[in-house]
């Protein structure tokens, strides 16, 4: 079972009429790669100290602001002994971000990084209207003197008298770097029944929308603003150089030093698991390690909504390669079932067992496997494959580490386009 805890936008303002927009905000930045684009951001999560001023929104400890410790990309290293806190998420809490599921580059967005700036001025409720501050829940109306974590008070709304939302950013030129770990669904549904459980108007696609965490948001503007206009661009997580925007970048390497851009990470029914264990990888690099059993469990790495054109990470691929070792230091190569499938519609190909394959290379405790895609006998077209999973067999206790999981020979997608400045241009 996957844990799917959807983000809830902190500020569920209803997108109702304000005055028609003036020229306060620039139009959408046109589409060249590397360019800044206009967007909007809300926040979720936050420190109890700040949130408790808004106790009428919901019960503690979240007060209706939600939490980013579980995201729809699955990057939570759950500790069943301790419970889950921001310490169980591999990235700092100010970097976590939920992208609206109707944003144009939502497919393959897990693990994608963005540089984000705040843009002072009016905030649009939709393409043409400015937020009317009398609609919805106003944070400053409840606690105008609430300070952020740096002790700063709100700078106020210069257009309060007009009932229109405008924001004074701390510094329009300052940027933060965030990574997608979650999604903000426009229409929220129950995973089991499919019933509609809520709507997040800001995430419904009128303007590119991100839900930052309180801690990222407060670096750009005072959290009492609740909602800000942004400028943003996707960047290489390591070099911070701009990347292509549409289609969004998906790495052909699924796991390198971390779960790479494009991929969610979903351990299930595990005893212990790590997103990245330093020193456990091939040649002392990072690996992802999991211990499962005696019940059936595993680790799935998936690219969401990636079977559409422009993404399709397995299109034309010849093989899936990966390195695997026993986590506890045995030189015996763990016998696990490797499977491919389509993450979104839950269609699966056949699985193969590492125990039935010959490794193509050994290094220390590690063995490298190269499995032809044809070995998985997928009952659907190869370009619709969007996940790989590693599972135990029922009853088997197994503890293993994986490294350098990659898709080999793919033709279609996932390449850094030539106009990007990334170090790893292909
Ligand atoms: C804002 O909403 C209120 C309440 O619906 C309305 O009376 C007011 O005219 C609106 N203000 C603007 C500027 O549209
Ligand atoms: C879980 O938390 C306990 C108690 O703090 C700690 O001893 C243990 O090492 C943690 N386990 C993992 C896998 O992080
Ligand atoms: C914005 O909201 C107004 C008032 O609800 C509506 O008339 C208009 O069509 C909306 N525009 C967009 C682009 O959604
Ligand atoms: C906020 O601070 C101002 C100035 O100190 C004070 O006059 C006002 O009463 C405070 N408002 C609230 C709601 O605490
Ligand atoms: C922001 O950058 C612009 C253009 O480089 C510059 O003119 C402006 O002074 C900068 N503002 C601040 C607050 O640094
Ligand atoms: C793709 O993954 C490779 C291998 O881990 C890494 O070196 C590279 O930086 C990644 N590319 C991008 C653009 O993230
Ligand atoms: C390797 O994993 C460690 C955590 O164990 C992490 O801090 C580090 O950033 C990772 N290295 C890379 C290159 O992602
Ligand atoms: C290997 O080590 C893990 C973590 O220390 C432990 O939970 C597990 O039972 C061990 N697995 C096997 C197969 O010995």
Image: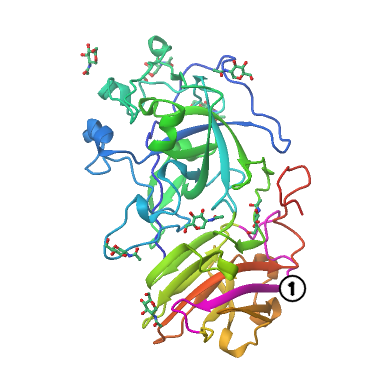
What x and y, as percent, mark residue 201? 44, 37
Residue situated furthest top in the rendering: 161
Q: Is residue 347 left or right of residue 270?
A: right
Picture residue at 42% right of the left edge, 86% below the top: 396
Dot 1, how many residues are within 10 Å of its Cα: few (below 14), some (14-19), or many (20+)? some
Q: How many marks?
A: 1
What x and y, as percent, mark residue 54? 25, 32
Picture quadrant where residue 145 is located: top left
Residue 326 drawn in magenta:
yes
Picture quadrant where residue 388 is located: bottom right
What residue is pinned by disc 1? 318
Of 375 and 184, which appears nearest the observer? 375
Residue situated furthest bottom in the rendering: 356
Q: Is residue 344 above or below residue 199?
A: below
Of 177 and 39, which appears nearest the observer? 177
Picture residue at 57% right of the left edge, 49% below the top: 112
Picture quadrant where residue 133 is located: top left
Q: Quadrant of the N terminus?
A: bottom left
Q: Is residue 231 above or below residue 410?
A: above
What x and y, as percent, mark residue 116? 55, 34
What kind of colouring is applied to the model shown? rainbow
Magenta: main secondary structure equals loop
Question: What segment carries the magenta color?
Answer: 306-330
Residue 199 drawn in magenta:
no
What x and y, as percent, mark residue 251? 65, 57
Picture residue at 40% right of the left edge, 61% below the top: 77
Q: Quadrant of the C terminus?
A: bottom right
Report if residue 39 is visible in the image.
Answer: yes
Does the residue tagged 1 have its C-beta within 8 Å of any atom of ligand 6? no
Q: Is residue 260 above or below residue 353?
A: above
Looking at the rendered structure, the secondary structure element under dot 1 is loop
């Amino acid at each position: 079972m996957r844990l799917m805890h959807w983000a809830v936008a902190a500020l569920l303002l209803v997108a109702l009429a304000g005055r028609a927009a003036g020229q306060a905000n620039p139009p959408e930045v046109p589409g060249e790669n590397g360019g800044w684009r206009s967007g909007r951001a809300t926040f979720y999560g936050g420190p109890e100290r700040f949130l408790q001023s808004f106790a009428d929104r919901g019960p503690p400890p979240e007060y209706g602001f939600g939490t980013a410790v579980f995201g729809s990309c699955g990057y939570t290293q759950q500790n069943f002994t301790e419970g889950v806190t921001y310490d169980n998420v591999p990235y700092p809490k100010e970097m976590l971000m939920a992208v609206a599921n109707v944003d144009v580059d939502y497919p393959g967005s897990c693990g994608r990084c963005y540089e984000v700036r705040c843009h002072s001025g009016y905030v649009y409720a939709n393409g043409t209207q400015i937020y009317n501050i009398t609609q919805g829940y106003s944070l400053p109306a409840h606690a105008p003197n609430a300070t952020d974590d740096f002790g700063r008070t709100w700078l106020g709304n210069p257009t309060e008298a007009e009932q229109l939302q405008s924001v004074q950013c701390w510094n329009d030129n300052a940027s933060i770097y965030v990574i997608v770990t979650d999604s903000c669904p426009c229409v929220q549904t129950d995973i089991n029944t499919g019933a509609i459980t809520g709507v997040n108007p800001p995430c419904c696609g009128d303007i590119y929308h991100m839900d930052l965490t309180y801690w990222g948001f407060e670096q750009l503007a005072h959290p009492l603003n609740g909602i800000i206009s942004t400028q943003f661009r996707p960047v290489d997580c390591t070099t911070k150089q701009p990347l292509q925007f549409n289609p969004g970048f998906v790495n052909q390497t699924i796991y390198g030093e971390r779960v790479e851009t494009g991929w969610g990470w979903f351990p299930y029914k595990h005893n212990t698991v790590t997103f990245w264990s330093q020193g456990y990888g091939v040649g002392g690099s990072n690996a992802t390690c999991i211990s499962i059993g005696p019940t059936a469990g595993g680790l799935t790495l998936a690219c969401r909504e990636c079977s559409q054109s422009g993404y399709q990470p397995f299109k034309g691929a010849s093989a899936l390669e990966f390195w695997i070792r026993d986590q506890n230091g045995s030189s015996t190569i763990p016998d696990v079932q490797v499977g491919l499938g389509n993450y979104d519609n839950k269609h699966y190909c056949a699985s193969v067992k590492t125990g039935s394959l010959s490794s193509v290379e050994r290094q220390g405790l590690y063995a490298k496997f190269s499995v032809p895609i044809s070995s998985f006998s997928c009952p659907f077209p190869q370009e619709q494959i969007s996940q790989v999973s590693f599972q135990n067999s029922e009853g088997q206790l197994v503890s293993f580490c994986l490294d350098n999981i990659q898709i080999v020979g793919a033709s279609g997608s996932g390449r850094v386009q030539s106009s990007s400045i990334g170090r790893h241009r292909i």
